[in-house]
Each structure stands twice: as C-alpha cells, then as structure tokens.
Amino acid sequence: MLNRLKELVNKPQRHRHPVYGPAPLLAQPAWLEGEHVEVVDELAIPFRLWTIRVRSAHQAAKVIKEMRTRAVGQVYTALFSLALEALKHRRRSERALWRAAEELGSARPTMPLRQLLEGVMRRAEEASGERRLAEAVHTSAVSFAQKIAERRWMWAEKAADLLRDGAVVLTHCNISGGLVMIARICRHRGKKVSFIATETRPYLQGARLTAWELWVEGFSVKVIPDGAAASFLARGEVDIVLVGGDRCALSGDVANKVGTLQIAIAAKEFGVPLYIAAAPDPSTPSGEDIPIEYRDPDEIFCGGWGIKLPKVFDAMYPAFDVTPAEYITGIITHKGVFRPQEVCKFFER
C-alpha cells in the first residue's frame, strides 16, 4: 500500500510546495488524467488504495453524493469534471455547460459548490464569446483548482502559527490532508505536535482518513470515540481544537461535519480555543441560511466497518451542524486568522 501511496502522491499534476514537498494525497485527491478525472476513493481507505475514473459530470456528481470523495476532494472533482466536460465537448452550447455545472453544484447542498462553479462559468463567459466558451470554462476551472492548491499551503502556515511546541490538537471530521500539511510545517519549524482524532460517525473518517494519513506520514495521532471529546477537554488533555468548515457565513457561523457543535460547546466551557479553517461565503449571511444535508438513514445502520445493524426503527442522519460564531475563537483563512464576528474583513484584504 505504501508503494501505491507514493505512486499516487508523485503524480506529475499534483501540486508541490517548494519547501514542504508534494501535497499529501488527501489534500488533492482528484486530478485530470487525459480524458478522465482520477478520484481517490476515500470510502476504500485504509483497506484499499485506488482511484475512480470519472468521465462525465453526471458520474462525478454521483461520486460526490456517495461521499467517495469529501471536503476539498469534492471541490477538485467538481472543478476538473466541469473542465473535462468542456474539453471533451468543445461544441457544447452554453446551456449544456451550465446544466453540467448545476448538477455538480447541487450534489451536496451544504458545501457551496454551486457558488464556486457559477463563479467559474461567469469568469469564462466574461473571457470569451460562446464560440470559445468551452475553452474558457476549461481554463477557468483549472485555474481555480490551482489557486486552491496554493492557498491551502498558505492556510496551513497560518494554522501552524497557532501551535506551540508540544501542542495536542483535537480534531473532528477530516480536513483533506490539512493536518498533515500543518504538521509538516511545524516539523520544518522545529515544533513537535500531536493529534487526537474523533472516530467521526458513521463512516469513521477520523479513523479511516485523518488518523491513517497522519500515521502514514509519521506523525503522532490517537483515535477516540466521538462521545469522549468533552471528557478529554475537561481533563485538560487538549491544547487546541482545530476543524475544517464546509461553509462559513458572513456572521461567522460555520457549518461542518455533524458533531462539531457539541465539541465547540464543550471547548468553550473548559476554556480550550477552537479554530475553524474555512473561507467565508459571500452568498451566505448567517448560519440560518446554510442548508443542512440529510443523508439516507441506512448509512447510520451500516456502521463504519461495513457492519449491518437490523433496521427495526427509524433513524435520522443530518450530515452537518452549524456552530454559532460565539463558540469559535477564530476562522483560519489563507489571508490570516479572523475573529468570527469580523470575518467580513477577509474581503477587504
């Protein structure tokens, strides 16, 4: 598996930082490869390490809905799949490309994919007339992806600034290689940090993704049950809570993997700072405006290791919850760290 990991990480299209090396696998888990998009199948990790070949926007939307790629992976998958549609169908009408963008953008409603892809399409329309629209869409989508890769290293450096030598970081969900990037930067600066990852129901992405990628890179990580986070915070075993954010409102409220809210409440109660990595979305005024995705309850019954429970009662599976700004110490962006109540200053910079 480690040889396969090295093979995937060293793909020529993967972004390389001049100091910290190639992006971790999950930091850029989708890329253009000829006439298809390669997407790392995150549901297969850590048992198998393989990629899914995506050849259309429709297939990409299905991969995103099934959570075979998540967090920044779904952003890359959507961008590159839109670029692929434009590349393979250069004579497609403007309406057809907008339909592809709409299908990709609606795959998971809590994540602001629709707003991102609309931005790609508008930039392309401004760049050229309809005759060359497909070429402009391809250029715009690939450009957005490149900027994301560069800005994620900038964000990781801002996050590393917050960690002292010996810090213990509690995290929830998976930040798509983000913690590995932060740990690499800390190591480069002579700081040693360790991590505690909640298991993160129902797919256990804290164990299967976060802990796995940190372990592969040689960093210290422990996995705890979701319900144990508050007790670790209460005992003073955590110095800082650091999670990702799927959508950040202009009010400073942030939507993230369900379970983040209860960790945020406990962190505030026990005096532990909580930082969320997220870029504010100008189309979302407050947390009340963030749509919460409800997934198939069967995912609750299947468990993270493929164990089927008898479905004899009802279940509800909200994939996200919203943490109000009052529980957040700071929002980490590639432009710097903002107090949640002042996150609008992100656009001033």
Image (tube, grey):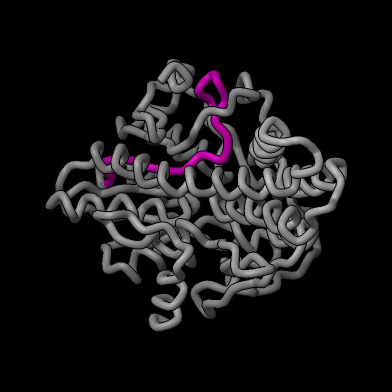
**Residue 246 magenta-drawn?**
yes
Could you tell me if residue 292 is visible in this image? Answer: no
Closer to the camera in the image, 184 or 21: 21
**Residue 128 magenta-drawn?**
no
Residue drawn at x 79%, y 65% is: 311
Closer to the camera in the image, 153 or 302: 153
Is 333 left, or right, of 34 in this rendering?
left
Is 288 left, or right, of 216 in this rendering?
right
Look at the image and tell me in which quarter the N terminus lies: bottom left
Closer to the camera in the image, 129 or 267: 129
Which residue is outermost to the left? 190
Give how far across and how far down residue 68 sits, in percent: 64, 63
Could you tell me if residue 327 is visible in this image? Answer: yes
The stretch of residues the image draws in magenta is 238-253
Give how far across and how far down residue 248 sits, in percent: 54, 30
Identify whether 135 is placed above or below 49. above
How many numbered marks, from 0 up?
0
Identify whether 94 is placed above or below 70. above
Is 23 left, or right, of 74 in this rendering?
left
Identify whether 288 is placed above or below 84. above
Is 170 left, or right, of 84 in this rendering?
left
Residue drawn at x 74%, y 66% is: 55
